Structure formats: structure tokens, C-alpha cells
Image (spheres, rainbow, N blue to C red):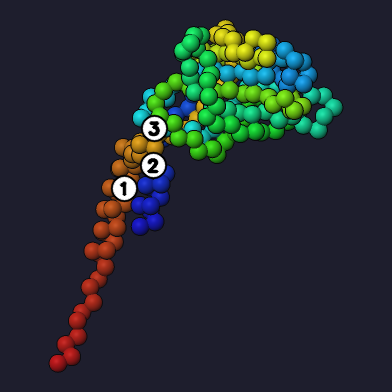
Amino acid sequence: MRLLALVLCCSTANADFNFDTGTPTDTVGSSLSSTSYLPTAQSKLGAVFTLTAESSTITGIEGFISSFNEGLETGGEVMASIYSHSISPPPARPEARLFTETFTMPNDDMGNWHGVSGINLVLPAGNYWVVFEVADDSTFSGGLKRGAEAFLPMEAFYSARSKWKRDDTVDHGWRVSGTPPDQFPVPEPTGLTLMSVAFVLLCQIRFSRPRSRRTNLS
């Protein structure tokens, strides 16, 4: 039975989805910082992604982000958020914040994948915005690198002066991971084969044991 349990656990198809733009290649990026540094600073950067399953659970949000806080112990705090998508009135932009979680950036001037994981946000099918944002009291100053190969279709930035403004040319690096709850892991062909072999072996072991003779006590 232990062999069968191992086969069922390890030989299953992966039902997870993952929107991964790939690592950006440009050395420059789009600035992201608190308005406490500059009143007109870009304090939010985001991009659209689409969920096609009837119901999906978001489990992780990452962006390829760098920080420029030299001399400080950490890079500062950044919020990883999911927003609803609005097209009325135009232009298309993030609307209501559906989720946010704060993470502390390390001092990383070269840039790498940073964000949050282990979240449990259930969403219906539709378009959404993944957003990195900086609160007014945050010490973070940095940016998202540009030039991702598989960019998301809509991108935008937010500042106190221009509010949300579209810029689909920046091609930031994003990763959004999760699992549609209505898709259950299905054994792959190799797993089915191993299960069949294990079942046959168990049957052979059971029926090949010598049967004990019954003693007539009468």
C-alpha cells in the first residue's frame, strides 16, 4: 500500500498555471518610489493578466524589481496587489484593489524576482491587474526592469499628477502563479503503468503465500 500511495502522490499532472513574462533584459527600468521622495513620483506599476477558468486561486505574485537604497539596512517596503480591471470610462486601468500584501525588499540594485507567496485569493474568470505599489510612508526607492520577452498586453503606471496612465511599451517582468480549484490532479500514463504493476505484485505476494492446514479438533 505504501508503494501505491507513493505513485498517487508523485505521478500526477501539474494543474497549476503561471503567467511568467521571463526575466527582463534591459539594464534600465521604470522608477517606483514613495511620494515622500518626490510628489510626482510613480508610486504604482501594473500590468493586465487574464484568468480563463471559472474559478482560480492566486497563490503568488512576483516582479523583477531592484532597489536603490544605499546605506539602509533593507530596500524598504513594497505592496504586491491585485486590482480589478475597468474599461469605463476609458482608458482601461486598474480600478478596485482586491488584495494587497506588503513585503520587505532587500538591498538589490541589480534586480531579481521578489514578491509574496502562500496567498489564497480566489477569483472568477476575467481580466485583472497585478500591481507593485509603494505607500507614502515607505522608504523604498527602486524600479521594475524592462524588456521582458513575453510581456503582458496592457501596462500602466500611477502618479499623483497623472493618476493611472497607460504605457504598453515598458514590458516589465511579472509572475502570477495559482491553481484553478476545479482542476484535480490526474494520473499521467507513466503513473497508471506503475500503479498497475504495483497492484499485480501485491496480488502475487498475497496469493503465493502457503496456506496453513486446518486442524480438525473434533
Mark 1, secondary structure of its residue: helix
Judged left or right of residue 130, residue 179 is left
In three-dimensional space, the C-alpha distance between marks 2 and 1, rounded to whole angstroms, equals 10 Å
Outermost bottom residue: 218
Q: Amino acid at mark 1?
A: Met
Which residue occupies 35% across, 36% down?
A: 182
Which of label 2 and label 3 is nearer to you? 3
Judged left or right of residue 118, residue 35 is right
Mark 2, secondary structure of its residue: loop
- Return the x and y of residue 38 as percentages of the image width and height: 77, 15
Which residue occupies 82% across, 24% down?
A: 70
Disc 3: CA contacts within 10 A as few (<14), some (14-19) or many (>=20) = some
Judged left or right of residue 168, residue 185 is left
Q: Is residue 78 above or below residue 89?
A: below
Q: Earlier in the sequence, mark 3 or mark 1?
A: 3
- Return the x and y of residue 84 as percentages of the image width and height: 49, 23
Which quadrant of the figure has residue 36?
A: top right
Q: Are the two marked residues, 2 and 1, in contact with CB atoms closer than 8 angstroms? A: yes
For residue 195, the mark is 1
Q: Amino acid at mark 3?
A: Ser
Q: Amino acid at mark 2?
A: Ser
Which residue bears the numbered disc 2?
11
- Return the x and y of residue 42 as percentages of the image width and height: 68, 15
For residue 55, the mark is 3
Outermost right residue: 71
Mark 3, secondary structure of its residue: strand
Q: Earlier in the sequence, mark 2 or mark 3?
A: 2
Which quadrant of the figure has residue 60?
A: top right
